[in-house]
Amino acid sequence: MSTGRDDLHTDEIVLSTCIGCGLPLTTGSKFCGHCGQGQNIEDPGQSERKWQSVRQVFIFFIICSIICCVFSFVDYFQTLTWSIVADGLFASLSVTFFVLNWHRCRSLLLWPNFSWKRLLVYCSIAIACSFLVGFMVDWLNKSLFSKTFSYYYFYSRYRYGKEMAIFFIAVMPALFEELGFRGFLVTKLLDITEEKQAILISGFLFAIMHRSMLSLFWLIPFGIWLGYIRVKQNTIWYGLCIHFCFNFTACVVEILQSAHYR
Amino acid sequence: MEETAAKVATHIGCPICRLEVDADEAFCNHCGFPLKGTEQQQRVFWLKRDTKKKRLAEADKKIRQASNTLFVVGGITFFFSLGIYLWGYYGSYNGDVSLFLSGAILGLIFVALGFWCKVKPLPAILCGLSLYLLWQVINLVVSPSTFLNAYVYKLFVIGFLIVGLRAVFEGEKVKKELNA
């Protein structure tokens, strides 16, 4: 955000000028010695703009919560058709908020400084983490609740169950969660606060949106990692690939386990 | 030695912030005090500075209230889930361990956010409010008949957190004005 301060370029040094009277300022001045104008004051509309961004974040989050909760907890909606409707609604929500902030978000669709090596490293870490997390979650579920949980089980009874599972577990969430959380949400949070805090908040919101208290131990670090890569690389594509690799690995493991026990 | 004497001659101490200012300056460039202003101008400066300090103190108070709200929500959630679990464990039915774990983790998260709020109020309140709203949405979907139970308490929690969030922005703005 520009403070409206101009700089006078001389041959050797750059002198700042007052935002009020335009006269040169002494180095390190917080107030102008000539007119008394504060040099660090906030743009009058900035506070309101920040609050508007907070509102948009909450609107996105609450709609997202309602969609996820209704289709997860109401028995009536536990069918394939309604599951597709839920995924469609979430995808529309992410795309809508992304497009509404198109001027701020569009640069994230580019892939600056693309590197195969970096992509390969990120994806390898994601696959390794997916195995580790899958093992730990399975162990926790067995130890605490004496049961196992499988996302693939829901799709396994349908024709093309494997293909559907991969599409709805690996492809759709990777694409639209990245668009919504790392695309829209992180961009809005960066309008409100500094980078580090924006990454932490987006990681936390991403984690709680999955509605599993026990899974927070890996969802929060995973969300923070994805947010960090989004901010560092200024693109959502690395995050999208990582997210896809992570979910795809978990999905394939579940499919293989299911075939083994059959 | 000569240099030091020259510095003393060209610099004066600001009566407000006590920092050194160039004697030629009409205003202190650290705090904005009108060094060469009339008594009236200096009084106005005092009043404005005092008002800003009061606004800052008010914002800090609201942030503290939001932090306390997170502690209260965390404590109630933790002990309520523990109570329900123990009541079930020693009572007529088996205590639900998953329900207890969810409640306990939820409570501990709110307490942790309460502590974080003292250091970084913006992310802590934003996360706390989001978590509380998600919890209420789950409550509405899973058990609509109990959604309105303790609605005054729920409204107070949401209200304190929203007020705290606004106070963070207000505090940031005033701090910049004061150049603190």
Image (spheres, coloured by chain):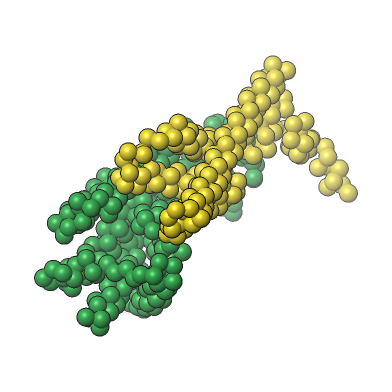
Chain colours: A green, B yellow
| Residue closest to the far right | B1
x and y percentages locating residue A123 in the rendered image: 35, 75
x and y percentages locating residue B157 in the rendered image: 48, 37
x and y percentages locating residue B48 in the rendered image: 63, 24
Give whichever of A55, A220 is nearer the camera: A220
| Residue closest to the far bottom | A260
Q: Indicate whether A259 appears above or below B2.
A: below
Give whichever of A229, B43 is nearer the camera: A229
Name the side, left or right, on which A100 lies relative to A205. Answer: left
Residue A45 visible here: no
x and y percentages locating residue A230 in the rendered image: 38, 61
Q: Quadrant of the C terminus of chain A?
A: bottom left
| Residue closest to the far top | B40
Quarter of the image where one finds residue B172: top right
Residue drawn at (62%, 38%), measured in percent from left and top? B179
Residue drawn at (85%, 46%), measured in percent from left and top? B4
Give whichever of A9, B120 is nearer the camera: B120
Q: Quadrant of the N terminus of chain A?
A: top left
Quarter of the image where one finds residue B177: top right
Residue drawn at (31%, 59%), measured in percent from left and top? A178
Residue drawn at (70%, 22%), measured in percent from left and top? B42
